[in-house]
Amino acid sequence: MSKLTFPRMGESWRTFKMLLEDLGNDVVVPPRPSKRTLDLGVRYSPEFACLPLKILMGTYLETVEMGADTIVTSGGVGPCRAGEYAMLHHKLLKDLGHDIKMIVFEPPRLQPLNFIKNVRALNKNRTSIRGIIAHIKRAWRKLQALDNAEKLSHIVRPREITRGTTSKMYRRVLGWIDQAYTTEQIIETETAALQALRGVPQDLDREVLKVGIVGEIYVLLEPASNLEIEETLGNLGVEVERSMFLTGWTRDNTWTETTEMMSVKEAAAPYLPELVGGHGRDSIGNTILCAKRGFDGMIQIAPFTCIPEIVARTILPRVSRDYNIPVLTFFLDEQTGKTGMSTRLEAFTDLMRRKKRLQRGQFTLTG
Amino acid sequence: MDLNKKLGIPSVLLYYIYFPFWLAFFNEIGVQVVTSSNTTKSIMDKGVREALADACVPIKLFFGHVMDLKNKCDCLFIPRVVCLNGKTIYCPKFLGLPDMIRHSLDGIPPIIDVRIDARQGRLSKIKAYLEIGSYFGAGRNIVLKAYCKAWIALRRYNRLLRKGLNPLDAMEIIKNPKNKKLILPAKSNLKFAVLGYPYAIYDSFISVNLLGKLKKMGVSVLTAENINPLTLAWQKNCGLPKRLFWTFSDAALKAAHYLFRQGRVDAVLHLTAFGCGPDSLLNKFIELEAKQHKEIPFMTLMIDEHTGEAGMATRLEAFVDMVKRRKEVVSTCRN
Ligand code: SF4
Ligand code: SF4
């Protein structure tokens, strides 16, 4: 039987593994990207390919070693490179002599036939359509549970009393959610997981800064690719709110907290009315929304040479000035080191803290 | 805005493809057009200073040209060109071009950034030009007439390109049809294909005068613009299941497919810009294709704002020598 693998993005693999197995496939779980993954990827990818392409290339090579012979991934019609990734990966793997099959999901709206064909290829158990929908629904619920646990960990970490307890607990609850199978189990373990995370001993009086994270989706979702920026920030006493999760951006949040009931697209419109591929426009829109909600700063992370984020980065200084919110950008490549990043993050945190104290000082003076 | 204003068009990026169209259009509705001067070191330096360090060279160059133009005109023409043929789009940086300029440079005159997207219906292009015309108070009929004239100009221009002229010469001929005779490039026995984006190949500053150098070495050059677009449209995509969705990259890949299979050129060069996103894929695809056609030598040349005259010349000379020797060996073997 063929062995399937798929791109890894953060913890979402737990869901995809469940879904593919439910349909009767043999799955090779992509390992967490390591130094070796990156080395492999860099060696066999074009020099100016963006980091996600390189890491995925490395991951594919590792999964091939583990016996995978079919890759399930997404295609696309642009405007950005991600839509062409699958073709390049396929060519590169073939060039290296690996006879790999690719199942590429194109947007179902544009190519419904491709979608049906792919689903049928994956449906080894010959599950009924209704059964497939039930599987997908359950998988989605699990994805939500994983995202919710991660979101909470971002809030708890900056307040923890003993450093490292949140991360430890977070890893433990991931295991619980992973084990849950039926919808009831998933909901139950989610509740337990959130409770356990909340139970981490915290100092609730600590002065915590709030920072929004925007940027390119892959480096946002895969901690191994962004050098665990969220954990580093949490340890610096910064609560992060990431603008992107696979299960979607928490819309309710933005709508209630900004008075103007604005969507990301509307917020970005005065600066960048065009969809420039990837999430360039969202980076701008979310920066504005977060500024309106009183965040202390924004961090943009993107792969080196990332086209949409370069467009966004060109415009962000103006947004930063107009809304008086500091913005720090990291363009990541294989050479970016964790120490360098930590130093810049520390300096940025200091800056935000000083700004915050200054503002508060003014308030007491005038009030 | 009225007709007395001067309209600035930066001579980079789409300039090489559509300037004759724009010029004819604006002349017809009575708007005076100024362009930035040819790329110089100082324009490049300005661009490097103003644009984001991580941007690709052509975008930096665009910033430089805008800086050069901004005091010479009353408004800038930077249309948001999304799609012109209904099939392929332009690099996302083209899509965000007016916004990048507007929000990161100071003291910029008003920008005409009409969105042109041919995927939105048959008449969308004409509508876009009607909108452009309305900036200058030009009426519907005038705009429609200008639009037709512009098409004719573009057709003429493209016909000249197909004859093997390079864009700058072709524009010169259109400008002074009388006093300049059509000098076709001399035939020589070495013929190279140069693939890459028109705004890199034809800008003799950033391409470090690649075309001139080849000419001096007695090599005649073929580019994707010299190939009939219909021929190109028929080509497959070097064995890829779908086309590349960026217009210029698509054309270059199809040209590669055609040239490698036709075998009428002696070598293929791919000129790629440092930091270019689409090229990271395109170059690899062409390279893999070249691997299957060993009889046609292939070389990639990467340019950036620091590319030196000397380095480029040495590499080119070595490559040309190699191709020459190969050709001799092959022909003696045949005899
Ligand atoms: S959004 Fe950025 S990282 Fe993603 S494919 Fe496009 S260029 Fe690459
Ligand atoms: S295609 Fe490449 S060179 Fe052209 S604008 Fe886009 S990134 Fe820059």
Image: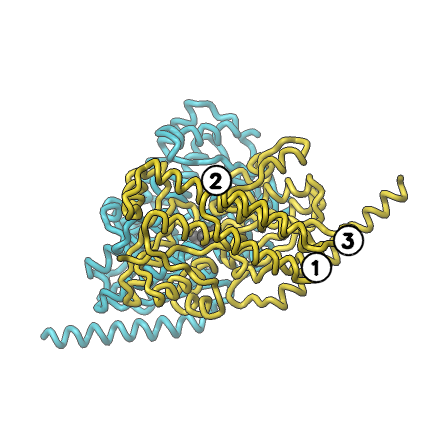
Chain colours: A yellow, B cyan
Secondary structure of residue under mark 1 = loop
Give the alpha-carbon distance from disc 1 to disc 3, as whole Å: 12 Å
Three-letter amino acid code of the residue under disc 3: Arg
Cβ of disc 2 within 8 Å of ligand 2?
Answer: no
Q: Residue at x 35, y 57 (%)?
A: A88
Tag shown at residue B80 = 2
Chain for disc number 1:
A
User: Splitting the image into 4 quarters, where does residue A138 fall?
Assistant: top left
Under mark 1, the amino acid is Leu
Question: In terms of depth relative to the viewer, which is nearer, A309 or B207?
Answer: A309
Task: Report which residue position mark 3 lands on.
Answer: A206
Amino acid type of the residue that numbered disc 2 sits on in the rendered structure: Arg
- Other residues around mark 3 within 10 Å, as few (<14) / some (14–19) / many (≥20): few
Nearer to us in this view, A363 or B153? A363
Horizontally, residue B107 falls left or right of residue B78, namely right
Is the residue A164 above or below the residue B10 in the image? below
